[in-house]
Amino acid sequence: MHFGPHLLLAALEGLVTSAVLALTALGLSLVFGVMRVVNVAHGEFFMLGAVLAWAVSTAISGHPAVGFVAALVIAPLLVGLVALVAERLVLRRLNYNPEGTIVATIGMLYIIQQLALTFYGPEARPVEPPFSYRILLPWFGYSGYKLSVVAASAILLVITWLVLTRTRIGLIMRATQYDRETAQAFGIPVERVYAGVFAVGAMLAAIAAVLIVPISQAHYLMGQDPLLLSFIVVIIGGLGSLRGTVVAAILIGLSDGIISMFFSPTLAKIIATLVVAMVLVFRPQGLFGTTPR
Amino acid sequence: MADKNGFFDLSKMTLSRRTALKGMAAGAGLALAPGFVRYSQAQSSAPIRIGFQSHRTGIGAAYGRWYEKTSAAAVKAINDAGGIGGRKVELVIEDDGTDPARGAEVVNKFAKQHKTDIVFGTLFSHVVIGSAPAAGENKIPYFVVSEGHHVASTKLNRYVFQPGITDVKSQIQSMAPWIAANAGKKVTQIFPDFAFGYDHRDYLPPALKAQGADVIAQIAIPPTESSFTKYFPQIPAETEVIYHVMVGPAVLTFVKELGEFYGSQRPQLFGFIDSLEAVDINSPGLEFLDGSHFWEGSPRYAQPDDSAAQKAYRAAVGIDDNGAAVGDPKDVSTAAHMFGCWETLYVVKKAMEDAGYKGPEDRAKLVEATEALKEFAEGPEHPQGPKTFNGKIHQCFGIQNISKVEGGKLKVVHKTKLEDGLYEPEGDYTTQAL
């Protein structure tokens, strides 16, 4: 294959990775930004979204698009509910203590993973895409569904941005992020904001998973890679910065796609990790993060 | 760390009578757990205990589940017919997480804690290679059902056997003539980037060369990879045949993305069914596979010329004519490999009876008795077909099936001959000390 089409394919693959990564990492970033909680179980919410998408879409017969749309609505809601329960039962009781919540979310990671293994099983199961259109380019074919994932993710990111900057809820969230105690003094129910943010963070991961599951199947171990990549993205972009998260996701996704196609996937991971190390050394707050006061 | 709630404050803990009782109960429970059990009666009446190193979790989990089903069915059949030397057989199962380090721990646990008679059942080659030294150190016979060439290469040790499934080198050698004659002469290989894949990488080029065909590109993919399109541009345009063998949970994605990439303008495809084991061949997105060919150890779909033994075996394991679990058509089996568990357990039975095996003190005798075996006739104990066994390299040889995807089923179009897969031994385990 010539250089041009090769690069195009690499860029397309990279964009799909970026799109899913941006949504997943945004959830992680939001939870850290507002709650100062490092959610190690974030990847498992991603996995849970995919597994539930499989359950919903197989329960509903008829055109695959019906099952998929139902999964896109129901799976994130269920995952949000699980996150809400986890927040109530675990994180709140630890008073959102930064170290304590890390240990607790590691525990949640294993509990969710093993429950999925017990009730869903070790197989990788497919979810049918809502439509299967193959875009025929002169050099190669490409899945139309994959491009629609990029579009869907972009729309969701814009919606999240609008909610955060243009609505009352967004204002309350930003106020809580800026200064928890002052926000509380102004009558903001901080604990309810925390619960909501934790649920929304998990739901973003679940939505990303539902979008990706027709491409790669639902499997109980699928949460590990997204977790690692999300951390990389969030560290590079700056914890709690929406803009940083999106920019870093596109950077990591595209470089992963291009480097792994022209060189090797291992090299792509090495470079991503190296970038994280460099960012931590020279700009610990991330590219777009602000220094904590 | 701020310990506001006093979780870690030991001074707050007082030992009540109830806690003490609970602790004692837990201790008693532990003492009754496996490994602490001691048989007081004579060994002749105690069951023969086979340690089953199973891939219950990790990338091999789909195989592990079906290996367990098949082994349970074989053990039931053996016990119903009177067991081994009149003693019942019992499987002791431990999960190795499809991980080499865990694998070695599991072998140690079988040898030291469970004190099983043998260890059995491993599929993934990196786990076999990781576990083999532990089997050698503990001097416990280790019967694997792995397909890799590592046992036959004589690079492992005298306690490792593979008597129930053929190895990759033999499979490739016997199928290369068919590939060169029917699929094409310019072959691109796609294989997993670990031991099992390296067998394919190393043995296919010379086998094809001998038939006047060439491997023009080799693409290694990490077994945990979840997205594959990025590898496909490495496939040269002049490729006539793509030879694919993939493993792990993402195999369906691999085949689907291959279909999206090529559409109907694809080169010929020759794959090891490993690329689709435990996956429904009629899954959406796999239509382009129609007309392509696969290697199968034992056919997934019932064939018109199936022997009575093959039919009985399928019924005992509980798979229907489509190779899925009876009663659940979506639960597709790993039929091409799992027959090896059934056949291996019958080899163990034969060898133990030949050796007059009484207990772990006779393990060396069991090794020698296994090495003395020469051939296994086709029949209820060996439903996949006749096999010969080379005691010097601890490896069996048998026939291979090449199946074509036709109307949503796999139809066997070519069966190799047993002689096609024979090669010169690369060493001799019997010269090693026991």
Image: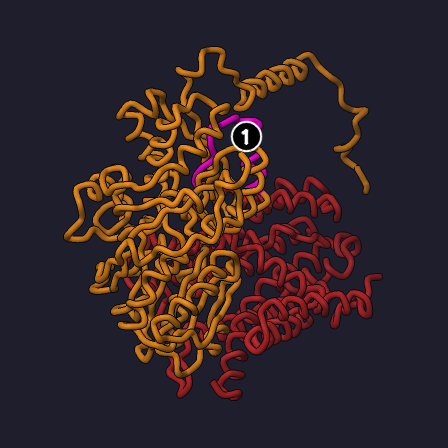
Chain colours: A red, B orange
> Is residue B18 something one can see in this rendering?
yes
Residue A73 magenta-drawn?
Answer: no
Return the residue nearer the eye: A229 or A77: A229
Relative vertical location of residue A210 with respect to residue B16 in this rendering, above or below:
below
* Amino acid type shown at disc 1: Ala
**Image spot of residue B28 (x, y percent):** 59, 16
Relative vertical location of residue B395 with respect to residue B261 in this rendering, above or below:
above
For residue A235, side relative to residue B279 (left or right):
right
Q: Quadrant of the C terminus of chain A?
A: bottom right
**Image spot of residue A46 (x, y percent):** 53, 56
**Image spot of residue B259 (x, y percent):** 36, 72
Identity of the residue furthest to the right in this view: A293
For residue A55, side relative to residue A22 (left or right):
left
Return the residue nearer the eye: B74 or A183: B74
For residue B348, side relative to residue A180 (left or right):
left
Which residue is found at the position 59% from the left and 44% from the top?
Answer: B101
For label 1, the residue is B111
The dominant secondary structure in magenta is helix
For residue A235, side relative to residue A132 (left or right):
right
> Where are the magenta residues, as a range?
B102-121
